[in-house]
Image: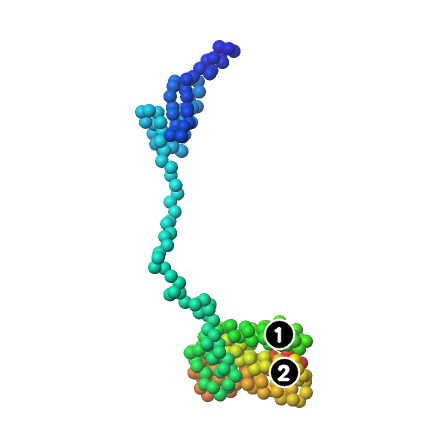
């Protein structure tokens, strides 16, 4: 066994790992094959540089290449459009549409009314539900459901009646803005009951106001001259449902 141990460990093969590289020297013994395989693995897989005459292996560190992002001094945010404009919110157009609804005899601007602006309609639907809540009626679900179904019905009807056609966003925008008089009626419902004759007359006037404003905007946007009464009738049916929620 002593003779076997001396033969087994008989080797002058030295591997010294220094900061400059890998030093290989000496003779090979019984472990020469395995260490040679390790050296070949290091040379093939991890170290790409061959051994030089001094027995040192030098390896250049390889780093992954990343795209370089440099700050351009000429880049600025001055040319960027405002955030509200990027989101499609224009307070000037919202104000003009609101004035057009409040004044039924004011001519409607077809270029503005053709925009799919849903900021004002969303605010008016929420305001109507809030006013009904203050009056002791929790009807948010009814308000949103009737708004969606009404927009789909009016959209189908207008596409059948007009030549150019209209989008869902435009119909929802016009019907939502024309809901403003109904919000005013719901404010009166907080102060006193509308179940009498005076309340019925006031509700009928508000229904006519909403339907007249919506039909005026639709015929101006879609160039449907002489068809205002045909458009106002289904609009009156839709706003009549909101009036029933407000009165009863």
Is the residue 3 above or below the residue 203 in the image? above
Give the residue at x 50% y 86%. 104
Judging depth in this view, the residue of 82 and 203 nearest the camera is: 82
Q: Is residue 167 visible?
A: no
Q: Is residue 141 visible?
A: yes
Q: Position of residue 134 (x, y in %)?
A: 65, 76
Whether residue 111 sits left or right of residue 153 in the image: it is: left
Judging depth in this view, the residue of 144 and 18 nearest the camera is: 18
Q: Position of residue 1 (x, y in %)?
A: 52, 11
Which of the 4 image quarters holds residue 129? bottom right
Label 1: element kind: helix
Circle 2 Cα neighbour tier, 10 Å, few/some/many (<14 / 14–19 / ≥20): some
Question: Can you tell which mark lies on residue 30?
Answer: none
Spatial CA span between label 2 and label 1 = 13 Å
Q: Residue furthest top?
A: 3
Q: Which residue is mark 1?
A: 130
Tell me the quarter of the image containing the C terminus: bottom right
Q: Position of residue 15 (x, y in %)?
A: 41, 24
Is the residue 169 above or below the residue 212 in the image? above
Q: Position of residue 227 (x, y in %)?
A: 48, 86
Give the residue at x 53% y 80%. 178
Give the residue at x 44% y 18%. 30
Judging depth in this view, the residue of 85 and 6 nearest the camera is: 85
Q: Earlier in the sequence, mark 2 or mark 1?
A: 1
Question: Can you tell which mark lies on residue 188?
Answer: 2
């Amino acid at each position: 066994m002593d003779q076997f141990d001396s033969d087994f460990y008989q080797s002058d093969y030295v591997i010294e790992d220094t900061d400059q590289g890998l030093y290989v020297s000496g003779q090979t013994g019984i472990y020469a094959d395995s260490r040679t395989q390790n050296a070949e693995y290091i040379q093939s897989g991890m170290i790409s540089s061959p051994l030089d005459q001094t027995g040192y292996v030098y390896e250049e560190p390889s780093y992954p290449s990343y795209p370089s992002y440099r700050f351009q001094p000429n880049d600025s945010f001055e040319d960027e459009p405002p955030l509200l404009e990027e989101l499609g919110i224009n307070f000037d157009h919202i104000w003009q549409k609101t004035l057009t609804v409040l004044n039924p005899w004011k001519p409607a601007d077809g270029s503005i009314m053709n925009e799919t602006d849903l900021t004002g309609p969303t605010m008016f639907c929420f305001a109507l539900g809030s006013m009904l809540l203050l009056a002791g009626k929790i009807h948010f679900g009814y308000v949103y459901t009737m708004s969606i179904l009404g927009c789909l019905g009016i959209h189908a009807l207008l596409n059948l009646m007009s030549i150019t056609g209209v989008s869902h966003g435009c119909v929802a925008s016009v019907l939502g803005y024309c809901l403003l008089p109904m919000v005013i009626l719901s404010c009166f419902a907080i102060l006193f009951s509308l179940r009498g004759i005076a309340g019925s007359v006031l509700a009928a006037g508000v229904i006519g106001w909403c339907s007249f404003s919506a039909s005026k905007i639709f015929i101006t946007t879609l160039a449907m001259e002489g068809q205002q009464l045909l458009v106002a009738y289904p609009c009156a049916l839709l706003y009549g449902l909101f009036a029933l929620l407000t009165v009863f």
